[in-house]
Amino acid sequence: WDDEHSAEDQWFLRDRTIEILEDRGRQIVEVFEMIASADGAVVVHCTAGKDRTGVVSAALLGLLGASRDIVVADYARSADAMPAMVRWYRGEGSISGPPTEAERVIIERAARPETMSAVVDHVDAAHGGFEGWARAHGWDRGVIDALRAALVAPE
């Protein structure tokens, strides 16, 4: 929260998302391995859906073959929840006054489509797409096959 608010430019979340993908790629691939080997439903979540869950969901959708537009739109849906998240952080159940300046910045920067679009640009330029990114972080071809078998409906 504090880091995000104190960031000097609007690209803080883009940069943090790329950092998570590149510095924690192996851990994200481990999440995929857990999803692929699960016996039943799996829930992936964090507090707001724009950071950890946003990264995992974007990479998973990319690996499963979702279009760029779908990856970006899925990420951007988290922005709808940010006013309620700010109220939750405040400890309030309903709006009781306008957001503070810090809260307004968080709401405005949250899960913007251009943030994920820039992240996908990075993944494409650096790795040739999400499959290349996953390979660079210890991905096993069997994991993607298992994920697709479990999560993609046959046509």
Image (cartoon, rainbow, N blue to C red):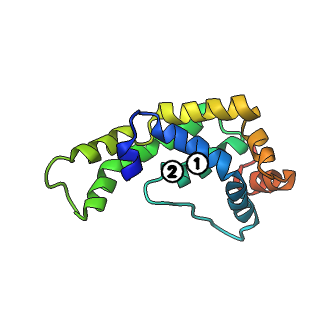
Secondary structure at badge 2 equals loop
Which mark identifies residue 55? 1
Q: Nearer the viewer, residue 72 or 102?
A: 102
Q: Nearer the viewer, residue 21 or 75?
A: 21
Secondary structure at badge 1 equals helix
Quadrant in which the C terminus is drawn: top right
How far from the left and from the top, in percent, is residue 98?
16, 47
> In percent of the image, x 41 and y 33: which residue is there?
10
Would you name the residue on which mark 2 appears? Answer: 51
Q: CA distance from mark 1 to mark 2?
A: 6 Å
Crowdedness near tag 1: few (<14), some (14–19) or many (≥20) residues, C-alpha within 10 Å: many
How far from the left and from the top, in percent, is residue 68?
62, 32
**Residue 74 visible to an observer of this rendering:** no
Q: Is residue 128 above or below residue 79?
A: above
Kind of residue sitting beneath label 2: Asp
How far from the left and from the top, in percent, is residue 62?
68, 41
In the shown orientation, is residue 101 left or right of residue 36?
left
Kind of residue sitting beneath label 1: Val
List the single residue furthest toward the left.
97
In the shown orientation, is residue 47 left or right of residue 119?
left
In the shown orientation, is residue 115 left or right of residue 134?
left
**Residue 33 visible to an observer of this rendering:** yes
> In percent of the image, x 62 and y 65: which residue is there?
42
In the shown orientation, is residue 49 left or right of residue 41?
left
Q: Nearer the viewer, residue 117 or 127?
A: 127
> In percent of the image, x 78 and y 39: which residue is there?
132
Whether label 1 touches label 2, CB < 8 Å:
yes
Q: How many marks?
A: 2
* Residue 146 figure quarter: bottom right
How far from the left and from the top, in percent, is residue 76?
46, 40
